[in-house]
Image (cartoon, helix red, strand yellow):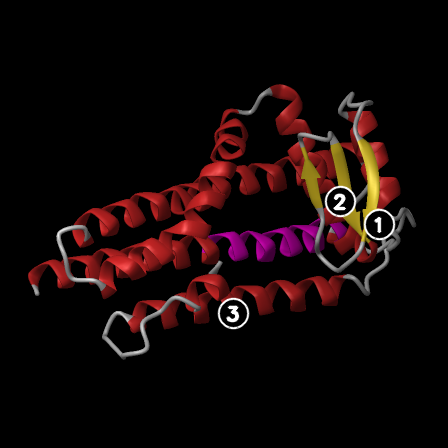
Amino acid sequence: MITRLAYYFPLVWDPTYILVIVGIVFSLIASSRMKATFSKYSKVQSYSGLTGQSAAAQILLYAGISDVQINQIAGDLTDNYNPRENTLNLSQSTAYSNSVAAIGVAAHECGHAMQHREGYAPIKVRNALVPVANLGSTLAWPIILIGLLFNNSMSPVLLNIGIFLFLGAVLFQLVTLPVELDASRRALVTLQNTGLLAGDELDAAGKVLKAAAWTYVAAAAASMLQLLRIILLSRGRRRS
């Protein structure tokens, strides 16, 4: 999202750029930490020898979920659970690896399947906000930019519309936090209960999932800083 929004930043420097820089730095640190942690523990093979895909299959079976299809997708750390298609999509670095990192990530995605199965309220809210967030991410900044560039009676209206649209994207990021944290909690509890990981292995998986959680915290913080910047720019234009 940050890369997309950066395209619409005004060319003239203003103090609110500091908010953008803080958000970018926070996101980069969180992303680097996640990649480093996953890389570290992707070299630690699990005692069970199970791959991420095999572990996911056992976890779903343990949870009584039999209608979720496990797929392999391209890329690294592109893992996701798709509730519309009822599929659990594991990246190649997760599906075919027998590392504790891969099993932890696979278990996390299974946590989302568990949430969906039991009707976990926050994930319902997040799924409902997806079209709102997509619309806000796509249209908010173009509308705001028009409102900032043209000083007429429509400028305040356009700025308010842009802020409202961007707020949808921010709300999506905020709702994502409890959803992701709960999925990680379910993952670790299930890994322990099933014995797929134990002791130091479980601690290592916990570190991977904790590092992943910080990427969502960073994304939410960056979005809120962006929203604050929009509000400050809007107020500045109205005063002028």
Q: Decide whether residue 115 is among the magenta residues.
A: no
The magenta stretch is 201-217
Q: Nearer the viewer, residue 169 or 65?
A: 169
Tell me the number on the disc at residue 95: 1
In the displayed structure image, the side of residue 127 where residue 132 appears, left or right: left
**Kind of element beneath mark 2:** helix
**Residue type marked 3:** Ile
Distance of label 2 from label 1 (alpha carbons): 8 Å
> Disc 3 designates what residue?
29
Label 1 CA crowd tier, 10 Å (few <14, some 14–19, many 20+)? many
**Residue type marked 1:** Ala
Q: Which residue appears at 39% of the width and 47% of the height?
A: 170
- Is residue 95 in view? yes
Q: Which residue appears at 65% of the width and 50% of the height?
A: 206
Q: Nearer the viewer, residue 27 or 103?
A: 27
In percent of width and height, residue 11 lies at 32, 77
**Kind of element beneath mark 3:** helix
> Disc 2 designates what residue?
106
Q: Earlier in the sequence, mark 2 or mark 3?
A: 3
